[in-house]
Amino acid sequence: MKSWSTPTPAPLPACPDRLRVHDTATGRLRHPGNGPDRASLYVCGITPYDATHLGHATTYVSFDLLQRYWRACGIAVTYTQNVTDVDDPLLERAEATGVDWRELAREQTDLFRADMEALEVLAPDHYVGVTEAVGLVAEAVAGLIAAGLAYRVPGTAGEPDGDVYFDLRAAERATDWRLGSVSAMDAATMAAVFPERGGDPDRPGKRDRLDPLLWRVERPGEPAWEAGTLGRGRPGWHIECSVIAREHLPAPFTVQGGGSDLRFPHHEFSAAHATAVDGRPLALTYLHSGMVALDGRKMSKSLGNLELVSRLRARGEEPVAVRAAVLAHHYRSDWEWTEQGLEEARRRVAAWRAALTGPHAGAGTVVLEAAHRALSEDLDAPAALRVLDDWAAGTLPGLERAGDGPDVATVAHALLGLRLR
Ligand code: ZN
């Protein structure tokens, strides 16, 4: 589907790729595995309702920083993101509010695009709705059944026959993937979070309680697509991302990103499905951004404690201050959105802007080197913002040797997505 359009960053003098990031799968700080010229990124997209709360915004701003880091190294990036534009939570919300699910998805995706543009998040090269990929998903699911890695469950308790589940034990026997190899969670943790995140451990007829749904056959009143031997139905959640990533990115691609609530089951099984289909790993590195709280609790649709980017924009907040408030926290940390945090960000943006008329406005190369070095250590955005603070205060080492090169406003925009003028 249509992506959005954020201005391409101005070219910067090439910086060395010294990136080390915290890979969830191995628990190690390491280079993400991209080549010298190319990198590829998949970040799981929204289910389009309650767009765009600060939790979403934090995820996409975090991975935007990765893309900007790579670009500053002269590395070409291919970026793919999905939209889960048909799934249970979307249909439940549509039902509860009396809105057609397609209309809800369209309106919320439009809002998300506008918020991403405002926050200067670079657009994906491939922005794909699951409703656009149903045929590919059906093909993959049929292949998994044929390979003995998926099975149909008979209907009981009013459910129709034919829902298809992934056989995780069979996949462990047949491939290099192992349960927990991506999420790095133990069995007890996986069992605890599975039902909280869309899993159905108690569905009769499943071979393992954690086997995830691949294909849901049609129920009365639910959207469904014709899918040959599978019958009419719609995709499960995890296979959607496996298939869209395979269609638009190398196998494996460099980084799979998302919020930390996607570690399990979503990223675990997206990886499992992709490997079960073609024998190759999904991604080289798995990065997860922290959760954002509001009023002391994780921001979530179920609790209803959401701060929306669009609401902040509507009341006149500058998007650059919102972005700076997000970047003041390390992407892996859990943190709380507060008015004080936003106020602090406004103050910093004002100080940076004031310094653009000062004696060190041309010191972009010095700022670039220091900020890029900060990002090299697990995308340390708070440290990169402190580089701007030090530059504005005139205390950043090396300012005296500022010579030719980009000015600081150009660097702040291209590297950090902060629009200072
Ligand atoms: Zn996903």
Image: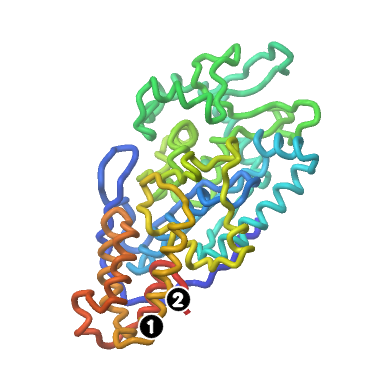
> Hey, which quadrant is residue 163 in on the image?
top right
Q: Give the alpha-carbon distance from disc 1 to disc 2, as whole Å.
A: 9 Å
- Give the residue type at disc 2: Leu
Residue 381 position in % (x across, y down): 34, 59
Is 57 placed above or below 298 here? below
Tag 1 secondary structure: loop
Q: Is residue 328 left or right of residue 265?
A: left
10 Å crowding of disc 2: few (<14), some (14-19), many (20+)? some
Residue beneath the point at 73% across and 18% down:
160
Q: Residue furthest front?
A: 340
- Pick the residue in front: 178 or 372: 372
Q: Is residue 290 left or right of residue 305?
A: left
Residue 376 position in % (x across, y down): 27, 59
Q: Can you see residue 146?
A: no
Q: Name the residue tied to disc 1.
A: 356
Residue beneath the point at 34% across and 84% down:
361
Q: In which quadrant is the N terminus drawn? A: bottom right
Tag 2 secondary structure: loop
Residue 117 position in % (x across, y down): 57, 65
Is 52 placed above or below 334 here? below
Residue 55 position in % (x across, y down): 50, 48
- Which colour assignment does the render follow? rainbow
Residues at circles 1 and 2 in contact by the CB criterion of under 8 Å: yes
- Pick the residue in front: 171 or 338: 338
Q: Name the residue tied to disc 2.
A: 420
